[in-house]
Image (cartoon, rainbow, N blue to C red):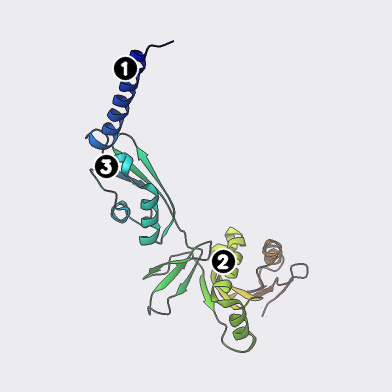
Amino acid sequence: MPSVRTLVVTGVLLVLAAAAAVWLLYGSSWLRVERVTTSGTGVLTPAEVREAAGVPVGAPLVSVDTDAVEDRLRQKLPRIDSVDVVRSWPHGISLKVTERKPVLVTEDARNSGKFLEIDRKGVRYATVDKAPRGVPRLELAPDTGGAAASLRRFGTDRLVREAVRVAGRLPARIAGDTRALKVRSYDAISLELGGGRVVAWGSSEKSDAKARALVALMKAAPKARHFDVSVPTAPASSAS
């Protein structure tokens, strides 16, 4: 059985070790933030990300609130879809960024001549001066009659999400040839392809089946200009 003296010495050593550890983490200059690195940026620059992150260089590495850094980045840079803030011992903070990618683009009603990028989740996240190449333009056209009623019932955000669902189901070849995706109502979505071709898609439901039907139609009738896959079990095409 250890003596009282041994227990006291052991206790003192433990207290000193704990104090040394606290000093090493918070008081010494050995484990402080000296650099902030970024990865995964494309449109954003590393400098933009570092500035928005606001990591306090010179602060103890252990004191950096990584959750707060993530929140600042998502709030200040909506283009960021996700970010992972990692302590890189002994002197670094690593910011691993995933940017949103546009699947649709639409004219910005509040900024003439500018465009809003929309990602796969239906988030309108960035205003740009020029529409990105190869991204279909979204046209919401619920102007009169049943179309206006659809807008009142579902709301703009819901109709945008339906359009995104359709865009996400298009085969690569057709997606690359899609110039615009027009939404008149929840169940009246159409595609405008190159060469003046038009596809009546209907709602976003059964989009995988509609995509397969469209591919088959285009192979069977390569000179057709109008395709209707709104009922995928009974697709149709016509030359005019």
Label 2 residue SS:
helix
Outermost bottom residue? 145
Q: Earlier in the sequence, mark 1 or mark 2?
A: 1
Find the distance from the CA under tag 1 to the CA under tag 2.
68 Å
Residue at numbered disc 1: 9
Q: Is residue 11 left or right of residue 107?
A: left
Does any portion of residue 179 appear in the rendered image?
Answer: yes
Q: Is residue 20 above or below residue 166?
A: above
**Front of the two marks 3 and 2:** 3
Tag 1 secondary structure: helix
Q: Position of residue 84 (x, y in %)?
A: 42, 47
Q: Which residue is mark 2?
A: 164
**On-image quarter of the C terminus:** bottom right
Expressed as whole percent of the image width and height from the top left, the position of residue 101 reads: 47, 59
Question: As rendered, which of 95 and 15 lies closer to the eye?
Answer: 15
Q: Vertically, is 118 above or below 110?
A: above
Label 1 or label 2, whichever lies nearer to me, is: 1
C-alpha distance separating marks 3 and 2: 39 Å
- Which residue matches tag 3? 35
Dot 3 amino acid type:
Arg
Could you tell which of marks 3 and 2 lies nearer the N-terminus?
Answer: 3
Question: Dividing the picture into quarters, in which one does residue 147 lie?
Answer: bottom right
Crowding at mark 1 (Cα within 10 Å: few <14, some 14-19, many 20+): few
Of the pair 34 and 213, the residue shown nearer to us: 34
Give residue 78's quadrant in the image.
bottom left
The image position of residue 200, as x and y in percent, is 66, 75
Identify the amino acid type marked 2.
Val
Amino acid carrying label 1: it is: Val
Is residue 192 among what the camera can see? Answer: no
Left of 150 or right of it: where is 209?
right
* Position above or below: 76 against 2: below
Residue at (27% x, 31% y) in the render: 24
